[in-house]
Amino acid sequence: MGHQGMKMTFESSKNLSAVGALLLVIGAVAGAAWSFSGLLSLIGLILLLVGLKGLATHYKEDGIFNNALYSVIIAIVGCVVGVGVIAASAVSALAELDIDWASIEDWANVGPDVANVFMDFDFSAIAALLGALLIGLVIFYVVTIIAMFFFRKSMNQLSAKSGVSLFSTAGLLMLIGAIIPVIGLLLIWIGAILVTVAFFQMKEDTTS
Protein backbone atom coordinates (compact mmCIF):
# COMPACT_ATOMS: atom_id res chain seq x y z
CA MET A 1 0.00 0.00 0.00
CA GLY A 2 2.85 2.33 0.90
CA HIS A 3 4.55 1.57 -2.41
CA GLN A 4 1.30 2.25 -4.29
CA GLY A 5 0.97 5.62 -2.52
CA MET A 6 4.54 6.47 -3.47
CA LYS A 7 3.83 5.53 -7.07
CA MET A 8 0.77 7.79 -7.16
CA THR A 9 2.86 10.63 -5.75
CA PHE A 10 5.46 10.12 -8.46
CA GLU A 11 2.85 9.90 -11.20
CA SER A 12 0.97 12.97 -10.00
CA SER A 13 4.20 14.98 -9.71
CA LYS A 14 5.30 13.87 -13.15
CA ASN A 15 1.91 14.70 -14.69
CA LEU A 16 1.67 18.08 -12.96
CA SER A 17 5.12 18.97 -14.26
CA ALA A 18 4.27 17.83 -17.78
CA VAL A 19 0.98 19.72 -17.89
CA GLY A 20 2.64 22.81 -16.41
CA ALA A 21 5.41 22.76 -19.00
CA LEU A 22 2.86 22.23 -21.78
CA LEU A 23 0.81 25.22 -20.61
CA LEU A 24 3.95 27.36 -20.66
CA VAL A 25 4.61 26.29 -24.25
CA ILE A 26 1.03 27.07 -25.29
CA GLY A 27 1.04 30.34 -23.37
CA ALA A 28 4.15 31.51 -25.19
CA VAL A 29 2.56 30.82 -28.59
CA ALA A 30 -0.80 32.36 -27.69
CA GLY A 31 0.78 35.41 -26.10
CA ALA A 32 0.11 37.79 -28.97
CA ALA A 33 -3.33 36.46 -29.86
CA TRP A 34 -5.01 35.55 -26.57
CA SER A 35 -5.50 37.95 -23.69
CA PHE A 36 -5.55 35.11 -21.14
CA SER A 37 -2.20 33.68 -22.22
CA GLY A 38 -0.50 35.34 -19.25
CA LEU A 39 -2.87 33.59 -16.84
CA LEU A 40 -2.32 30.32 -18.71
CA SER A 41 1.44 30.70 -18.36
CA LEU A 42 1.12 31.55 -14.65
CA ILE A 43 -0.95 28.43 -14.02
CA GLY A 44 1.58 26.40 -15.99
CA LEU A 45 4.46 27.81 -13.97
CA ILE A 46 2.75 27.00 -10.67
CA LEU A 47 1.94 23.45 -11.77
CA LEU A 48 5.51 22.96 -12.97
CA LEU A 49 6.98 24.09 -9.65
CA VAL A 50 4.55 21.97 -7.63
CA GLY A 51 5.40 18.96 -9.78
CA LEU A 52 9.14 19.56 -9.48
CA LYS A 53 8.76 19.82 -5.71
CA GLY A 54 7.16 16.39 -5.70
CA LEU A 55 9.86 14.93 -7.94
CA ALA A 56 12.58 16.48 -5.78
CA THR A 57 11.05 14.74 -2.77
CA HIS A 58 10.70 11.47 -4.66
CA TYR A 59 14.33 11.46 -5.81
CA LYS A 60 15.60 13.00 -2.54
CA GLU A 61 17.32 15.77 -4.50
CA ASP A 62 16.30 19.23 -3.29
CA GLY A 63 18.25 20.92 -6.08
CA ILE A 64 15.65 19.82 -8.64
CA PHE A 65 13.10 22.13 -7.08
CA ASN A 66 15.37 24.75 -5.52
CA ASN A 67 17.24 25.60 -8.71
CA ALA A 68 13.98 25.87 -10.66
CA LEU A 69 12.60 28.15 -7.93
CA TYR A 70 15.75 30.30 -8.02
CA SER A 71 15.28 30.58 -11.78
CA VAL A 72 11.71 31.83 -11.40
CA ILE A 73 12.53 34.28 -8.59
CA ILE A 74 15.47 35.75 -10.50
CA ALA A 75 13.35 36.13 -13.64
CA ILE A 76 10.52 37.87 -11.76
CA VAL A 77 12.80 40.22 -9.82
CA GLY A 78 14.80 41.03 -12.95
CA CYS A 79 11.68 41.82 -14.97
CA VAL A 80 10.33 44.07 -12.21
CA VAL A 81 13.63 45.95 -12.00
CA GLY A 82 13.91 46.25 -15.78
CA VAL A 83 10.36 47.52 -16.20
CA GLY A 84 10.83 49.87 -13.25
CA VAL A 85 13.94 51.43 -14.79
CA ILE A 86 12.20 51.95 -18.12
CA ALA A 87 9.00 53.29 -16.55
CA ALA A 88 10.83 55.73 -14.28
CA SER A 89 12.87 57.07 -17.17
CA ALA A 90 9.78 57.33 -19.37
CA VAL A 91 8.05 59.49 -16.76
CA SER A 92 11.21 61.61 -16.46
CA ALA A 93 11.41 62.05 -20.24
CA LEU A 94 7.76 63.07 -20.41
CA ALA A 95 8.34 65.58 -17.64
CA GLU A 96 11.14 67.16 -19.67
CA LEU A 97 8.62 67.55 -22.48
CA ASP A 98 6.25 69.21 -19.98
CA ILE A 99 3.84 66.32 -20.37
CA ASP A 100 1.87 65.10 -17.36
CA TRP A 101 1.51 61.35 -17.87
CA ALA A 102 -1.80 61.45 -15.97
CA SER A 103 -3.25 64.24 -18.12
CA ILE A 104 -5.30 63.30 -21.18
CA GLU A 105 -4.86 66.79 -22.61
CA ASP A 106 -1.07 66.54 -22.42
CA TRP A 107 -1.10 63.12 -24.07
CA ALA A 108 -3.00 64.64 -26.99
CA ASN A 109 0.04 66.80 -27.69
CA VAL A 110 2.66 64.06 -27.35
CA GLY A 111 3.12 63.75 -31.11
CA PRO A 112 3.78 67.44 -31.81
CA ASP A 113 5.98 67.81 -28.72
CA VAL A 114 8.19 64.88 -29.65
CA ALA A 115 8.31 66.08 -33.27
CA ASN A 116 9.52 69.48 -32.10
CA VAL A 117 12.30 67.84 -30.09
CA PHE A 118 13.58 66.09 -33.22
CA MET A 119 13.15 69.16 -35.44
CA ASP A 120 15.22 71.26 -33.04
CA PHE A 121 17.86 68.50 -32.88
CA ASP A 122 17.54 68.57 -29.10
CA PHE A 123 17.70 64.98 -27.96
CA SER A 124 18.18 65.73 -24.26
CA ALA A 125 14.51 65.10 -23.55
CA ILE A 126 14.64 61.56 -24.91
CA ALA A 127 18.27 60.67 -24.19
CA ALA A 128 17.39 59.41 -20.72
CA LEU A 129 14.57 57.29 -22.09
CA LEU A 130 16.74 55.75 -24.80
CA GLY A 131 19.44 55.04 -22.24
CA ALA A 132 16.91 53.47 -19.91
CA LEU A 133 15.56 51.30 -22.71
CA LEU A 134 19.08 50.06 -23.37
CA ILE A 135 19.70 49.43 -19.67
CA GLY A 136 16.35 47.66 -19.41
CA LEU A 137 17.18 45.40 -22.35
CA VAL A 138 20.57 44.59 -20.82
CA ILE A 139 18.88 43.75 -17.52
CA PHE A 140 16.40 41.46 -19.26
CA TYR A 141 19.22 39.81 -21.22
CA VAL A 142 21.45 39.17 -18.19
CA VAL A 143 18.54 38.03 -16.02
CA THR A 144 17.37 35.59 -18.68
CA ILE A 145 20.83 34.01 -18.86
CA ILE A 146 21.09 33.69 -15.07
CA ALA A 147 17.56 32.29 -14.82
CA MET A 148 18.21 29.72 -17.54
CA PHE A 149 21.51 28.80 -15.86
CA PHE A 150 19.68 27.76 -12.71
CA PHE A 151 16.89 26.05 -14.66
CA ARG A 152 19.50 24.07 -16.57
CA LYS A 153 20.99 22.95 -13.24
CA SER A 154 17.55 21.75 -12.21
CA MET A 155 17.10 19.85 -15.46
CA ASN A 156 20.58 18.31 -15.21
CA GLN A 157 19.82 17.03 -11.72
CA LEU A 158 16.45 15.69 -12.83
CA SER A 159 18.11 14.02 -15.81
CA ALA A 160 20.68 12.35 -13.58
CA LYS A 161 18.05 11.05 -11.17
CA SER A 162 15.43 9.99 -13.72
CA GLY A 163 17.75 8.68 -16.41
CA VAL A 164 15.95 10.78 -19.05
CA SER A 165 18.76 12.52 -20.94
CA LEU A 166 16.31 14.75 -22.80
CA PHE A 167 16.07 16.93 -19.68
CA SER A 168 19.74 17.90 -19.84
CA THR A 169 19.52 18.43 -23.60
CA ALA A 170 16.54 20.74 -23.16
CA GLY A 171 18.25 22.63 -20.35
CA LEU A 172 21.34 23.22 -22.47
CA LEU A 173 19.25 24.36 -25.44
CA MET A 174 17.38 26.84 -23.26
CA LEU A 175 20.62 28.25 -21.84
CA ILE A 176 22.03 28.67 -25.34
CA GLY A 177 18.77 30.33 -26.34
CA ALA A 178 19.13 32.80 -23.48
CA ILE A 179 22.62 33.76 -24.67
CA ILE A 180 21.63 34.31 -28.31
CA PRO A 181 19.57 37.51 -28.76
CA VAL A 182 16.18 37.44 -30.54
CA ILE A 183 16.38 34.03 -32.27
CA GLY A 184 17.28 32.56 -28.90
CA LEU A 185 13.65 32.98 -27.84
CA LEU A 186 12.75 30.29 -30.37
CA LEU A 187 15.41 27.99 -28.91
CA ILE A 188 14.03 28.54 -25.41
CA TRP A 189 10.55 27.68 -26.66
CA ILE A 190 11.82 24.53 -28.38
CA GLY A 191 13.65 23.63 -25.18
CA ALA A 192 10.38 23.98 -23.27
CA ILE A 193 8.76 21.55 -25.71
CA LEU A 194 11.58 19.06 -25.10
CA VAL A 195 11.11 19.45 -21.34
CA THR A 196 7.43 18.62 -21.77
CA VAL A 197 8.25 15.52 -23.81
CA ALA A 198 10.89 14.48 -21.26
CA PHE A 199 8.34 14.55 -18.43
CA PHE A 200 6.08 12.19 -20.35
CA GLN A 201 9.07 9.87 -20.89
CA MET A 202 9.73 9.51 -17.17
CA LYS A 203 9.18 6.15 -15.52
CA GLU A 204 9.41 5.32 -11.85
CA ASP A 205 12.34 3.15 -10.81
CA THR A 206 10.70 0.13 -9.20
CA THR A 207 13.92 -1.82 -8.67
CA SER A 208 14.66 -0.14 -5.30
Image (spheres, grey):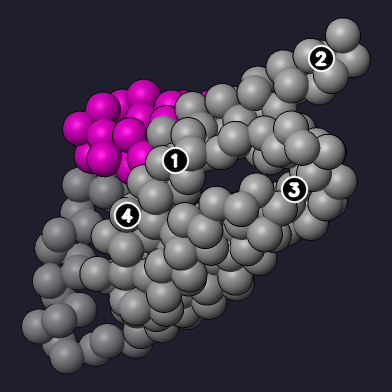
| Residue drawn at 39 percent across, 56 percent down | 191
Could you tell me which residue is drawn at 33 percent across and 34 percent down? 26
Q: Would you name the residue on which mark 4 appears?
A: 190
Sequence-earlier tag: 4 or 3? 3
- Does label 1 or label 2 sit earlier along the sequence? 2
Taking the spot 20% from the left edge, 79% from the top edge, the residue there is: 117
Q: Is residue 88 visible?
A: no
Nearest to N terminus: mark 4 or mark 1:
4
Q: Is residue 143 magenta?
A: no
Q: Position of residue 1 (x, y in %)?
A: 87, 9
Q: Residue type at mark 2? A: Gly
Left or right relative to 44: residue 107: left
Foreground residue, 91 or 54? 54
Q: Secondary structure at mark 4?
A: helix
The crowd level at tag 3 (other Cα within 10 Å; few <14, some 14-19, many 20+) is many
Q: Quadrant of the C terminus?
A: top right
Residue range highlighted in magenta? 23-46
Task: Check if mark 1's residue and mark 3's residue have beta carbons within 8 Å.
Answer: no
Drawn side of residue 117 relative to residue 18, left or right: left
Instruction: Name the mark on residue 126.
Output: none
How far is mark 4 from mark 3, CA to CA?
A: 21 Å
Residue 196: mark in rendering: 1
Q: Position of residue 4 (x, y in %)?
A: 79, 14
- Is disc 1 in contact with disc 2, using a CB cutoff of under 8 Å? no
Q: Is residue 121 above or below residue 98?
A: below
- Mark 3 or 2: in front is 2
Q: Where is residue 174? Give x, y as percent.
A: 44, 64
Given the image, on which type of amino acid does mark 3 rest?
Phe
Find disc 2 in the rendering and name its residue.
5
Foreground: disc 1 or disc 3: 1
